[in-house]
Image: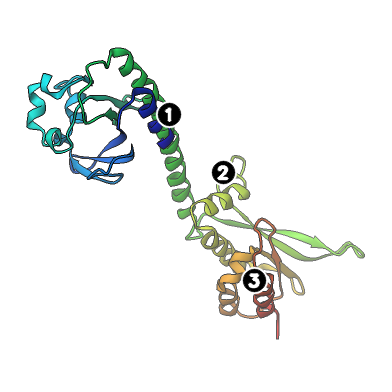
Amino acid sequence: IERILASVRGHLGVEIAFVSRYVEDEERELTHVSTDLELPMSAGFREPREASYCWHILNGVLPELIRDPADHPFTSTLGITEFLPVGCHLNTPLRLSDGTVWGSFCALSRQSDRSMTERDLAILKSFAGLVTERIESALEGDMRHEQARRRVSSMLDGQAISVFQQPIHDLASGKPVGVECLARFPNINQRGPEAWFEDAELVGLGTELEMTAVACALETLGQLPQGFYAAINASPRTILTGELLSALEAHGPADLVIEVTETQNVEDYYALTAALDALRPH
């Protein structure tokens, strides 16, 4: 978006270009600002909507192309006109594909410019379309992130997680000697375990979901035949937190094998080795 704003300034020959969004409390917030000037407002600046040209352009009080504020008496009621001051001003609302007005796209100079035409406004709108595409992509990403967080959070009480004990056979005798505890989640045909753990990593709940799966697996150990061992999966990061060690100590003695998953890079093998040593029987 910053590059788009800089391009707008270059194409139109204006001093300032910015994107703003409408937020709570009837305010608008500048999200991106491009200028070489020292301005009293930058990204993050908020003000009442009614104090801006953008809001009144959206509501049809002012036109999208203003060559000189003096041509429009209403501009004299807005403090920014003299404060900045505002000279030439081009603005268009940023509308999402569902018709929602997200904010506005603006380019201006502090001097009037009667050479500006509707063609210049059309250029501004073309760039605004590019900004809208990026905003919608970011909003979709935020929505997916929030949906993933809700999905993972709903699993953390362990009530919806099932544990399957997959037999492990001795190659020489062919007899079962243990089981691997595998966590299974709802809608297994649509979303496999990998997708759930990927979601958890995405939203910063990877260790929490792993430890929930570990707790569920430990609850099933009483079902094992005498002499069988159980294998439980854990990532390097979860092992390094010490939470796995705490869970195993709280559970009590058990014939367990901890399988270290290979989906994460290990930055400190010495620390991981020490954490694994702490898990070994003494």
Q: Residue at x 17, y 20 (%)?
A: 60
**Reading the chain from its start, which is encountered first: label 2 or label 1?**
1
Image x and y of residue 197, in percent:
58, 53
Q: Tell me the crowding category of disc 3: few under 14, some 14 to 19, or many 20 or more residues within 10 angstroms, Cα based.
A: few
Q: CA distance from mark 3 to mark 2?
A: 27 Å
Depth check: give the residue in front, 151 or 107: 107
Q: Is residue 247 visible?
A: yes
Q: CA distance from mark 3 to mark 1?
A: 55 Å
Q: Is residue 107 above or below residue 281?
A: above
| 215 sits left or right of 150 in the view | right
Q: Tell me the crowding category of disc 1: few under 14, some 14 to 19, or many 20 or more residues within 10 angstroms, Cα based.
A: some
Please give the residue where the numbered disc 3 appears in the rendered image.
222
**Reading the chain from its start, which is encountered first: label 3 or label 2?**
2
Q: Nearer the viewer, mark 3 or mark 1?
A: 1
Depth check: give the residue in front, 55 or 251: 55
Question: What kind of residue is marked 3?
Answer: Gly
Which quarter of the image is occupied by the C terminus? bottom right
Q: Which mark is residue 187?
A: 2
**Reading the chain from its start, which is encountered first: label 3 or label 1?**
1
Question: What kind of residue is marked 2?
Answer: Asn
Q: Which mark is residue 133?
A: 1
| 159 sits left or right of 193 in the view | left
Depth check: give the residue in front, 210 or 219: 210
Q: Pointers 2 and 1 in contact (CB under 8 A)?
A: no
Query: Is disc 1 placed on a helix, strand or loop?
Result: helix
**In the figure, residue 76 lies in which quadrant?**
top left
Query: Is disc 2 placed on a helix, strand or loop?
Result: loop
Q: Residue at x 61, y 50 (%)?
A: 193
Q: Nearer the viewer, mark 3 or mark 2?
A: 2
